[in-house]
Image (tube, rainbow, N blue to C red):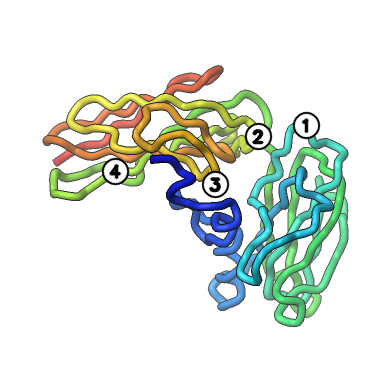
Amino acid sequence: MTDHALTGQDGAAKRAVIDITGHRRPASYYRQIVFGLRADPYLAVQRPETHGRPFIGSPWAWSDSIASWTWPGWEGKPVTVEVYSDADEVELLLNDDLVGRAPAGPAHLFRARFDLLHEPGELCAVAYRNGVESGRCQLASAQGPVTLTAEADRPVLTTKLGELGFVTLTLTDPHGTCWTGADRPVHVEVSGTGELIALGSAAPQTQERFDATERHTYDGRALAIVRPTAVGEIHLLATAPRCEAAETIIQVE
C-alpha cells in the first residue's frame, strides 16, 4: 500500500495538525496560541518554491509552511515567514538585524507575515505585550555535514499484544538541527527479538511502500515501527548515503 492511498491529495495533508509520522505541524502550535496554551510566539516558513503563488484551499487549509530556516540553494531569494502570537506585536530578526515589526494578537488573527530574502543563519521572533518582551522563538539553519540519528520513543517494550515501538530517523547537522534540505533514502535493518513492520515518512504523495526496508526522508525525517517478538533486545540499524550508520537498542521485557 502506498502513502497516496492513505493520505489522499496534498491538500489533505496541509489541513492536518499532525503529520502521518506523529510530527506536529505549524497549525497545531497556532491552535495552542489561540486557545491560550502557549505563551511564546511560533515561527513557520513557507517553502520558497511557493513564494508568489496564490493560495488555493478551503477555509480549513493551511499554508505549506514548516519550522525550518534551512533552504540550501535559495540564498538571496524571497521567502515568506509567518509568526503566530497572542501578543500585541511581534518583531522579526535575521542574524540580529531587524526585518520588521508587525501587530499580532486576536485583532490580527494571531499572526503576522514578513517577506524577506533568505539568508542562512538564525531567525528570531520576539513578542511584545505593552511594549515589554513576553517571549521569543528561534530557527537556525543547519550547517556542516549531515548526520543520521535514530531515536526510539521509549527504551523498554513488553511482549504484550499490540505493543509497538516507534523510532524517529532524522537527518541533522552536528548541532542537532534538522537538515530539511538534505533528504535521502534510509535503509533499516532490525534484528534480535523484534521485527520491522512499517517504515514511512510524511511525504504527502509518493509511490514508496510502508512495508519496505528503505524509504526517502521527507523534510529530513522518517519513522520506523518495530514489534517485539520475544523477551530480549531489539537492534535497529539505519544507514543512508554519505552518513555514518545510526543504531538504537530497545529492551523487551
Q: Residue at x 19, y 50 (%)?
A: 162
Work out whether 66 lies above or below 56: above
Tell me whether the residue at label 4 lies in contact with that at label 3, contact meaning CB atoms closer than 8 angstroms. no
Tell me whether the residue at label 4 lies in contact with that at label 2, contact meaning CB atoms closer than 8 angstroms. no
Query: Disc 3 designates what residue?
Result: 204
Query: Disc 2 designates what residue?
Result: 181
Query: Closest to the observer: 52 or 127?
Result: 52
Quarter-of-image position of residue 209: top left
Tell me the kind of residue under disc 4: Gly
- Which is nearer the N-term, disc 4 or disc 2? 4
Work out whether 240 lies above or below 156: above
- Which is nearer the N-term, disc 4 or disc 1? 1
* Crowd class of label 1 (few under 14; some 14 to 19; many from 20; radius 10 Å): few
Tell me the kind of residue under disc 1: Gly
- Which is nearer the N-term, disc 4 or disc 3? 4
Quarter-of-image position of residue 80: bottom right
Q: Is residue 214 left or right of residue 235?
A: right
Q: Which mark is residue 165?
A: 4
Q: Residue at x 71, y 80 (%)?
A: 106
Q: Secondary structure at mark 4?
A: strand
Tell me the kind of residue under disc 2: Gly
Work out whether 217 lies above or below 202: above
Q: Secondary structure at mark 1?
A: loop
How far is disc 1 from disc 3 in space, using C-alphas?
Answer: 23 Å
Tell me whether the residue at label 1 lies in contact with that at label 2, contact meaning CB atoms closer than 8 angstroms. yes
